[in-house]
Image: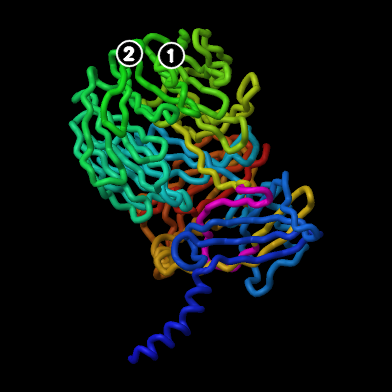
């Protein structure tokens, strides 16, 4: 082919590829309000199922062009029954009304107004809970099964949650869009501590003898630096340029320059290190030793600049927002000490019975959990002053002590929720997550964890956030292929509109859909009376061939009540023609979820196939 013909061909194809790569944009005007919807693919060139995408909504006044302030938009993707015809206003209003009402049997394909609460459990699972149905209940979205019990976790890349599993020498990479384990990575023997690198999508993980860098998007374990064998802790500088990794047995802190091929430098310490934290105020790493000595290390010079003495026996050090005040918890001595990075001195201390063992922060408060108590202490950060007694308030978070159940984890048991001035508290002994609003005397509500002990909690925020006045955005993964109504609602000023969105099929995912098992409930009704036997029948077929799956020896049913307290696993009896049956007897009114499991066919509770039934009073 001649150069001229090649150039002509490229010129002809360029507009096509340019169109594919461009974001989808549409504009509607509703009662004097202009609504702009933009969907930008973050991987690949088009809007394809399962791909990450940034969704942006902009609201402006049609007359003045001014951006709308002080609004609270909601948005959903809903599969359209007639793909050829976009929904009219009446149908759009009906869909929005159903979504606002929280109808369990009329759910959107994608909800941009929710956050998921994820718990790291005592058993080898992660629970994914949807707290939308009021703070007195919840809904189990998924149960992620791990190879072994998780120890620590970190969010990295586009919707990836990485969980270390030291008992099976692996790191699970969990896709937070599908809640499936995308890969189990080999990051070395007994991986434990893991953290996300600021300013990067990478996460770093310590194993018994190394620290390694994981690239989330392609799920590869890249750079590895050797470490002395033993227990480790790690912390990043605020900009992610430096990483400090402690080695307890070797009395060392290794400083890694994350973006440089330079060999890491090991800094000798006077005592075995317990923990490390970074202060953004001083620009220094603070390494806490078993004897209470805190080594202040300059990451640029790789040298100890100062030593500060705290009480021996302390196990954790964390800096509050702003990086000035470091909280040091000493469980054996029931002690909390506060270090001022500006002065380099221990400024405050307080004795608090119950064994304080963890401290986490919101913008205004420090939260402290105790091993031998259900009480959570709150320290107002604005009240921290030299020579002043530590000012505290508290609230009870449960019925039992936090240390009564669950094995230790460095992952946070208290995290801020997306709702301003509120936190979520994991309580392993109560098998619950408590929702607390700042200023209240007690938690406002409880989320059930469905019979599992939550040792740590994390929030996956999918809600639309205001990026600038009148502009709201979020990042999510696109739903299954098809035609959708992107429904947008604003209460005041009133906006009701639906956009036409098309999502393309991904060939790889299409092949995965063909493989596996299809579960079809065979029921005449989905409403039953409590205390009466419920006969359940399912048909299992091979998706690839359409043929019934007969004689599965390990087929069983998992059923549980959404509000918790009732769970059953029952063997399924084969009837022939792919049909299996069993009977359960729910004892309380509520919504129940029913899954079919089979290890032989790799059919698990996170397959996305479930039956929801309603049980009414007697």
Q: Is residue 45 left or right of residue 124?
A: right
**Residue picked out by circle 1:** 337
- Residue 16 shows in this picture: yes
What residue sits 46% from the left and 53% below the top?
178
What label does residue 302 carry, if any? none
Q: Position of residue 393 (x, y in %)?
A: 58, 15
What residue sits 44% from the left and 57% below the top?
575
Image: magenta residue range: 467-485
- Hey, which quadrant is residue 501 in on the image? bottom right
Front label number (1 vs 2): 1
| Image height of 390 relative to 361, above or below | above
Scheme by which the image is coloured? rainbow
- Along the line of sight, which residue is nearer the eye, 40 or 504? 40
- Along the line of sight, which residue is nearer the eye, 296 or 147? 296
What residue sits 38% from the left and 90% below the top?
4
- Sequence-first disc among 1 and 2: 2
Q: Looking at the rendering, in which quadrant would you find the C terminus?
A: top right
| Image height of 317 relative to 454, above or below | above
Q: Looking at the rendering, in which quadrant would you find the N terminus?
A: bottom left
Q: Is residue 185 left or right of residue 500?
A: left
Q: Position of residue 573 (x, y in %)?
A: 43, 51
Circles 1 and 2: CB distance less than 8 Å? no
Q: Position of residue 508 (x, y in %)?
A: 40, 66
**Residue picked out by circle 2:** 313
- Residue 572 shows in this picture: no
What residue sits 49% from the left and 54% below the top?
609
């Amino acid at each position: 082919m001649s150069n001229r013909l090649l150039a002509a061909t490229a010129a002809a194809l360029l507009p096509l590829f340019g169109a594919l790569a461009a974001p989808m944009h549409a504009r509607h005007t509703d009662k004097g309000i202009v609504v702009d919807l933009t969907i930008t693919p973050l991987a690949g060139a088009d809007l394809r199922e399962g791909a990450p995408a940034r969704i942006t909504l902009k609201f402006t006044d049609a007359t003045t062009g001014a951006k709308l302030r002080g609004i609270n938009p909601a948005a959903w993707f809903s599969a359209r029954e007639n793909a050829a015809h976009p929904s009219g206003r009446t149908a759009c209003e009906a869909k929005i009304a159903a979504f606002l009402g929280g109808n369990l049997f009329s759910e959107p394909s994608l909800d941009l107004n929710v956050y998921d609460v994820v718990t790291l459990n005592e058993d080898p699972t992660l629970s994914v809970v949807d707290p939308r149905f009021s703070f007195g209940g919840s809904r189990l979205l998924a149960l992620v099964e791990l190879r072994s019990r998780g120890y620590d976790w970190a969010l990295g890349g586009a919707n990836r949650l990485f969980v270390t599993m030291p008992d099976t020498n692996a790191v699970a990479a969990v896709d937070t869009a599908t809640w499936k384990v995308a890969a189990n990575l080999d990051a070395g023997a007994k991986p434990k501590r893991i953290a996300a690198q600021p300013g990067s999508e990478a996460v770093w993980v310590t194993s018994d003898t190394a620290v390694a860098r994981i690239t989330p998007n392609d799920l590869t374990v890249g750079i590895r630096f050797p470490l002395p064998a033993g227990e480790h802790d790690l912390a990043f500088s605020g900009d992610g340029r430096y990483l400090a990794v402690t080695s307890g047995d070797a009395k060392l802190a290794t400083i890694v320059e994350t973006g440089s091929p330079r060999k890491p430098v090991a800094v000798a310490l006077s005592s075995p290190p317990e923990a490390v934290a970074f202060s953004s105020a001083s620009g220094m790493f603070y390494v806490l030793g078993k004897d209470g000595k805190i080594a202040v290390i300059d990451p640029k010079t790789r040298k100890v600049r100062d030593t500060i003495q705290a009480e021996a026996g302390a196990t954790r050090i964390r800096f509050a927002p702003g990086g000035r005040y470091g909280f040091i918890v000493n469980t054996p001595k029931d002690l909390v000490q506060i270090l001022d990075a500006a002065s380099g001195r221990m400024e405050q201390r307080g004795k608090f019975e119950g064994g304080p063992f963890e401290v986490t922060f919101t913008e205004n408060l420090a939260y402290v959990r105790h091993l031998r108590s259900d009480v959570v202490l709150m320290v107002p950060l604005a009240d921290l002053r030299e020579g002043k007694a530590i000012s505290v308030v508290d609230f009870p978070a449960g019925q039992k002590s936090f240390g009564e159940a669950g094995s230790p984890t460095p992952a946070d048991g208290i995290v801020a929720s997306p709702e301003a001035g509120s936190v979520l508290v994991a309580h392993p002994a109560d098998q619950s997550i408590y929702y607390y609003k700042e200023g209240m005397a007690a938690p406002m509500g409880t989320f059930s964890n469905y019979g599992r002990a939550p040792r740590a909690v994390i929030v996956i925020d999918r809600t639309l956030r205001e990026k600038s006045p009148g502009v709201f955005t979020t990042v999510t993964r696109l739903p299954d292929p098809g035609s959708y109504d992107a429904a947008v609602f604003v209460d005041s000023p009133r906006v009701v509109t639906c956009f036409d969105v098309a999502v393309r099929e991904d060939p790889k995912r299409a092949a995965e859909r063909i493989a596996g098992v299809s579960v079809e409930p065979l029921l005449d009704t989905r409403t039953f009376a409590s205390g009466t036997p419920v006969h359940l029948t399912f048909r299992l077929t091979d998706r690839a061939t359409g043929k019934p799956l007969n004689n599965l020896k390990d087929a069983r049913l998992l059923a549980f009540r959404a509000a918790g307290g009732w769970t059953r696993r029952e063997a399924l009896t084969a009837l022939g023609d792919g049909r299996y049956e069993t009977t359960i007897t729910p004892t309380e009114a509520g919504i129940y979820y029913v899954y079919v499991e089979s290890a032989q066919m790799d059919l698990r509770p996170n397959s996305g196939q479930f039956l929801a039934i309603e049980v009414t009073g007697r």
